[in-house]
Image (cartoon, helix red, strand yellow):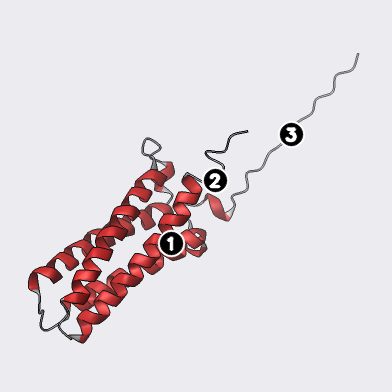
């Protein structure tokens, strides 16, 4: 009776997706949408802050607060995807949280952009701020639609 001893060695190979930083996310459609939203909201914030005269002070304070709030929220979401933090906190339903923030953000920034467009008084930087507010709203609606398709897609309610 002969016994054969086999030894196997395994090697662990790290792929580029195993690192801490997920740079590939910034090249996906949701990543590009988040970058576009962040850039447009930064432009809005800069246009409001660097404007010399505000014809409607309360209107642009509201616009500034809404833009600043959602800029910080979307920056947090982008950094969470970039550093894969949502996998480390599975107790929170992140797609639903993002869906909620995008739905509230798109409505509030749309309302603030309308108020800013009405009260801009011909100040060119405030006109640009309201236009970029509408662009940010459009990007949020697109991101809302794509996240809805992922979360509650057509196959979620399909019956056989």
Q: Name the residue located 46 percent from the left edge and 59 percent from the top edge.
A: 30
Vertical relation: 126 (above or below) 148 = below
Residue 142 tag number: 1
Mark 3 element type: loop
In 3D space, how far apart are the residues under numbered discs 1 and 2 (Cα atoms)? 17 Å
Residue 94 tag number: none
- Is 71 placed left or right of 157 in the picture? left
Mark 1 element type: helix
Percent x, y of residue 157: 52, 38
Q: Nearer the viewer, residue 119 or 1?
A: 119
- Nearer mark to the viewer, of 1 and 2: 2
Q: Name the residue located 66 percent from the left edge and 43 percent from the top edge.
A: 11
The residue that disc 3 covers is 8
Q: Nearer the viewer, residue 148 or 71?
A: 148
- Nearer mark to the viewer, of 1 and 3: 1
Badge 2: residue crowd in 10 Å (few <14, some 14–19, many ≥20):
few
> Closer to the N terminus: mark 1 or mark 2?
1
- Is 100 placed left or right of 7 in the picture? left
> Closer to the N terminus: mark 1 or mark 3?
3
Percent x, y of residue 130: 25, 75
Q: Quadrant of the C terminus?
A: top right
Question: Cβ–Cβ below 8 Å for labels 3 and 2?
Answer: no
Q: Name the residue located 10 percent from the left edge and 83 percent from the top edge.
A: 53
The residue that disc 2 covers is 154
**Residue lying furthest right in this view?**
1
In 3D space, how far apart are the residues under numbered discs 1 and 3 (Cα atoms)? 51 Å
Badge 1: residue crowd in 10 Å (few <14, some 14–19, many ≥20):
some
**Residue lying furthest top in this view?**
1
> Closer to the N terminus: mark 3 or mark 2?
3
């Amino acid at each position: 009776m002969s016994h054969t001893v086999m030894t196997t060695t395994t090697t662990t190979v790290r792929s580029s997706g195993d690192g801490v930083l997920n740079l590939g996310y910034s090249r996906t459609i949701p990543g590009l949408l988040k970058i576009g939203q962040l850039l447009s909201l930064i432009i809005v914030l800069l246009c409001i802050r660097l404007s010399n005269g505000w014809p409607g002070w309360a209107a642009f304070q509201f616009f500034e607060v809404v833009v600043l709030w959602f800029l910080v929220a979307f920056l947090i979401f982008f950094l969470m995807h970039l550093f894969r933090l949502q996998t480390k906190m599975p107790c929170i339903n992140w797609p639903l949280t993002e869906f909620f923030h995008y739905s509230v953000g798109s409505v509030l920034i749309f309302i603030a952009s309308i108020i800013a467009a009405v009260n801009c008084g011909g100040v060119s930087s405030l006109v640009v701020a309201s236009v970029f507010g509408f662009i940010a709203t459009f990007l949020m609606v697109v991101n809302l639609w794509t996240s809805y398709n992922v979360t509650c897609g057509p196959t979620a309610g399909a019956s056989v």
